[in-house]
Image: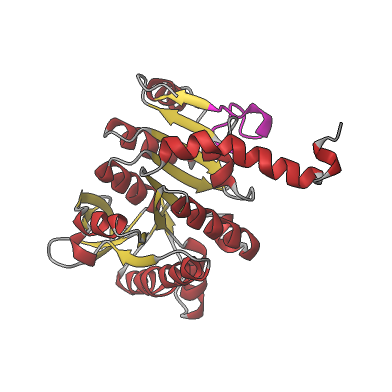
Amino acid sequence: MLNDSDFITKAEATRVRVLSEALPYIQQFTGRTVVVKYGGAAMKDSSLKDKVIRDIVFLACVGLRPVVVHGGGPEINSWLDKLGIEPQFKDGLRVTDAPTMDVVEMVLVGRVNKELVALINKAGGLAVGLCGKDGNLIKARPEGREGIGFVGEVNSVDIKLLDSLIKSNYIPVVSSVAADEMGQAYNINADTVAGEIAAALGAEKLILLTDTPGILRDYKDPSTLIPKVDIQQARELIETGVVAGGMIPKVNCCVRSLAQGVKAAHILDGRIPHALLLEIFTNEGIGSMIVASDFKI
């Protein structure tokens, strides 16, 4: 009797098995909105960037509705250096005076955003670049701390423009710049923007691409990855210090989006090729998933 190995290579067999395993997830999530916060090494490494872009286009091609939110800290630092402006940080936030705000807006809206749009279009998708100012998508308010300049928070989200684009099969690409009622521009944390947009859209998933494997019991040991927690467990991990440092705002962002109706939030290592597809379309996944206490997978 002939077997599979007589006709196909192991690589081909693996590819077929993966596609077969993905089918029920494609069926489950088709037509659902997935908000992806794109940042970290996956934006800086050109080979990783190509894979992330292809993954986003793949999601759209199999019936999911991706929305991309991005930051661009390293690119902002590069341009500040070129212009002779020294980057400053306070309490983990970029001090954003008026000249820095000009650079932030130029880089995020005019360069990074349009580059991502072009890459998605080149890969066969249909992308449209936006910032919070477009169609009053995001109304900002000052973050409130003294000495940090035009650092903002999300005051409200109006999804009419996003909804129209998504229903027309476009992939919205949103930079984290928005304005207040007076038109003053603010620099807002991209994780926060992604979480609030996901909540406003009633997204199936919020996915944060980071430079860590996910939530770790021991931040020095990737083997201590916690694959799944609910909201209460996530809060306990913060209270006990298991989640610390830069992971606290990311986990809080996920918890806030879940509390507003998002079905599941994921923290993934964007340095792993095809992290998005591995998390959404395989049984095991690769990162940490946070869910509402009453939500069953």
Pick the front one: 142 or 286: 286
Above or below, comparing residue 171 to residue 232 in the picture: below
For residue 221, side relative to residue 154 (left or right): right
Q: Residue furthest bottom?
A: 83
Q: Nearer the viewer, residue 278 or 61?
A: 61
**Occupied quadrant, residue 112:** bottom left
Q: Does 203 sit left or right of 49 as displayed?
A: left
Q: Position of residue 185 (x, y in %)?
A: 25, 66
In the picture as drawn, the residue positioned furthest to the front comes out as 1
Question: In the figure, 263 relative to 275: above or below?
Answer: above
In this orientation, which residue lies closer to the viewer: 24 or 3?
A: 3
The residue shown at (36%, 49%) is 194
* Residue 280 place in picture, x, y as percent: 51, 39
- Location of the C terminus by quadrant is top left
Residue found at x 34% / y 44%: 195
**Camera sees residue 84:** yes
Residue 55: percent from left, percent from top: 54, 53
Q: Which residues are magenta?
A: 213-227
Q: How is the image coloured?
A: secondary structure
Tell whether 183 sits left or right of 34: left
The quadrant in which residue 142 appears is bottom left
**104 sits left or right of 83 in the view:** left
The quadrant the N terminus occupies is: top right
Q: Nearer the viewer, residue 153 or 289?
A: 289
* Image point (49%, 66%), residue name: 124
Tell me: residue 78, above or below residue 276: below
Which residue does the image show at 47% across and 79% down from the upper left?
Answer: 84
Q: Is residue 286 visible?
A: no
